[in-house]
Image (cartoon, helix red, strand yellow):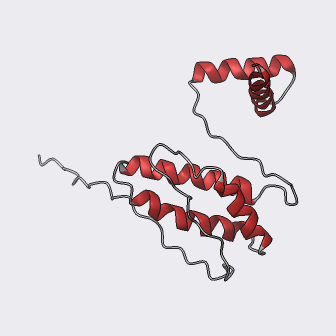
Amino acid sequence: MASFVRPTTAAAAFTCPETVTTDAPRNTPSLSGLYSDATNPTAGPRVGELVADLRRDGLKPALVVDHLVGAYCPLVANDASLSDSQKADRVRRFARQVTGLAYGQTGQQELDVLVDVPLMPTVLHQVEQAAAGAGMPRDAWIKRAIKRQLAVP
């Protein structure tokens, strides 16, 4: 009886998708500072400014996301200190951040910045219990807890 051996395939190396934003404004803001290094999980405070600039120039939210992720991905891809898995995670986090900002409310003086923090299931359960006990949604409870902690000298 012959055994079937499935050929192994090596995981593909990290690559950025090809993006072409033909609707990008001609005076696109500088993307300098978009990526600093492997210790920066997202693009830092500059990303909110870039989203606001692109939205002010009339770019639709989907194109803002495409444009910024398209500019950010090659910067991550060139970071030799990251594994392919870390690169993919970094780009996914950035895409979530930009998407939240691009589709957020327009006309705000300041844009909210999304923070993606992994929690152990036990800690998440404690947070959810505390939020439920306070009669608040989880995100509102976390926001209040952070503000309270920052108010303590």
Q: Residue at x 38, y 58 (%)?
A: 14
- Which residue is situated farthest in the front direction here? 153
Q: What quarter of the picture does the C terminus occupy?
A: top right
Closest to the observer, 32 or 82: 32
Q: Quadrant of residue 151?
A: top right
Q: Quadrant of residue 143?
A: top right
Image coordinates of residue 99 in percent, x first then y, are 68, 57
Horizontal relation, residue 32 to residue 104: left or right: left
- Which residue is situated farthest in the left direction here? 1
Q: Relative to 146, does residue 31 appear above or below in the rendering?
A: below
Q: Relative to 64, does residue 121 appear above or below in the rendering?
A: above
Horizontal relation, residue 108 to residue 70: left or right: right
Closest to the observer, 47 or 93: 47
Image coordinates of residue 18 in percent, x first then y, are 48, 73
Image coordinates of residue 147 in percent, x first then y, are 78, 28
Horizontal relation, residue 132 to residue 87: left or right: right
